[in-house]
Image: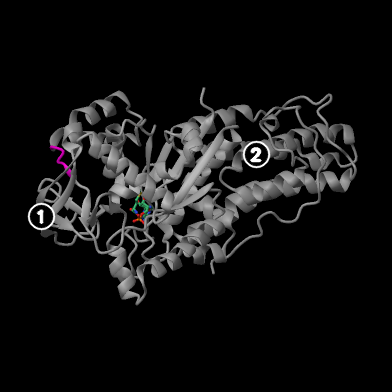
Amino acid sequence: MKNTFYATTAIDYPNGRPHIGHAYEKIVTDSYARWNRLLGKDVYFLTGTDENGQKLIESAKDAGLDTLEFVNKNVEVFKDLCTRANISHDDFIRTTEKRHEDSCVELWKKLEEKGLIYHGHYSGNYCLSCESFYTEAQAPDGNCPEHHKPLELKEEEGFFFKLSEYQKWIIDHLKANPDFIVPGARYKEILSRLENDDLRDLAISRPSQGWGVKVPGNDNFVMYTWFDALINYYSALDSDQKEKFWPADMHVIGKDILWFHSVIWPCMLKAADLPLPKQVYVHGMVLAEDGKKMSKSLGNVVDPFEMLEKYPTDTFRYYMLKNISSSGDGKFSEQELVDKHNTELANDYGNLLMRVIKLGLKSFPDKVYTPEGVAQEIDALPYFERAKEFMDKREHNKAIDAIWDLIVSLNQYVNDKEPWKHKKNEAAFAPIAYNCFYGMAAASYMLQAFLPECTKTALEYIGSSALGTELMEFGAATYTPQPPEALFPKVELK
Ligand code: ME8
């Protein structure tokens, strides 16, 4: 059994500062990477930037900078976002790197040798923002379905990939692998589009403006940015890593780029005789509080840096992971973020921990809590199993709920057992405390996937810094509580 897990985010366009959707996608993918590390898998987690688009030339011009200078500057901000949001990526690929360009050229040549790339002419309706052609069926009103701007008739000469040859193959592949696209509604959408619209060959080059990956053997053209961008998932891995991690287990993306990932990318790989990724997981979109798409002109944009400055990183992560449904869009409300922090993180989780540790330290300062003679009254394993089922289904918000049920039941246990009544009776106090410490360590252990900072502190307070799945087993650990500071001081809307 393969014990590796390779997860990727989309690579972001660095034509401005990262937005909240970028932060969300990275946090979601990070949670799956961390979760799989907890399960003992060898994880590779890739994120990065998509730098070859022709529209970057325009954006750089508008900013009065040379294209590379402009891109270099913005990429640093994307990297900074990763640091601030506590993203545990193993690699950050930039598509202007040599390793990427080399891979693209290699793949191109391979397809060319197999007769799957040809030179030809194309005329169609084009959107500059997407850098894509749209058929009449896709854009019946003549507007770009993503940008809602009129499409322009564009005639092009260049290179084409014989995508049309793969129509039956991709339909069969999807039918044989219903988990290839998650959630199911997105799977049905793509399948139905494939069954109702003919696949056309894909224009995979653009006239060169001196920016982009050069088409091998023809300096007049660069590769179409989507053709090169998708290859990043493969080009980031060196040959040993390819051996170990390819094919990717999970590409995490938003719905606007699903077609590229679930149709074009698998066909490119199939054409190159390479194994296909296991899954494309489509997360929901973060919307403004009013339910609209965030946009500068509407003045409803939430800046992830501002949120990460104002509130603890774990609070931001927790809110995003819980409040944006794993399968649909969700609205971002700062007030709700504050409320979640105060009720769930500070009260349910933080206070529970404080209460029991402080009580124990006050009454029996040097006590080490061991499992000897303690009856098991809390069982974390069923919660772990439910959380795992949800993570396997890519329902991380429900996985957090399943872990939270353990925290709620621990709060109930403490209320029922009233350990404060046994402050002078160690024999009565110790078993209650042991059950609590075990439950809290298990919950904290699982929550590390989502809340990496506070759970580390919590495990140190309980004295369980030795992390491992044995924490899930009752009686596997002894606990030496450390004096805690407030894990989650209350916050107010700022
Ligand atoms: O599409 N909420 O880059 P990008 C959640 N370079 N996710 C969102 C979002 C929102 N409001 N807005 C965008 C690109 N996203 C290409 C990808 S991959 C080979 C090339 C998501 O910077 C979006 O769906 O426009 C995508 O998955 C990611 O952010 C990057 O978007």
In the displayed structure, does residue 418 sit left or right of residue 410? right
Disc 1/disc 2 C-alpha distance (Å): 52 Å
> From the Cβ of disc 1, is ligand 1 less than 8 Å away?
no
Q: In x, y percent, where is residue 175?
A: 27, 26
Residue at image x 13%, y 35%?
Answer: 196
- How many numbered marks have been drawn onto this rendered protein structure? 2
In the displayed structure, does residue 101 sit left or right of residue 55? right
Give the quarter of the figure containing the C terminus: bottom right
Circle number at residue 141: 1
Residue corresponding to mark 2: 445
Circle number at residue 452: none
Q: Decide if residue 238 is in sight here.
A: yes
Residue closer to the observer: 71 or 187:
71
Question: Residue reaching furthest front?
Answer: 217
Residue closer to the observer: 175 or 446:
175
Q: Which scheme is used to colour this image of the protein?
A: one colour
Hey, which quadrant is residue 474 in on the image?
top right
Tag 2: amino acid: Tyr
Reply above or below: 54 against 235.
below
Q: In x, y percent, where is residue 331?
A: 39, 55
Reply above or below: 492 against 115.
below
Residue at image x 15%, y 56%?
Answer: 126
Tag 1: amino acid: Asp
Please report the bounds of the magenta region as a residue range.
Answer: 198-202
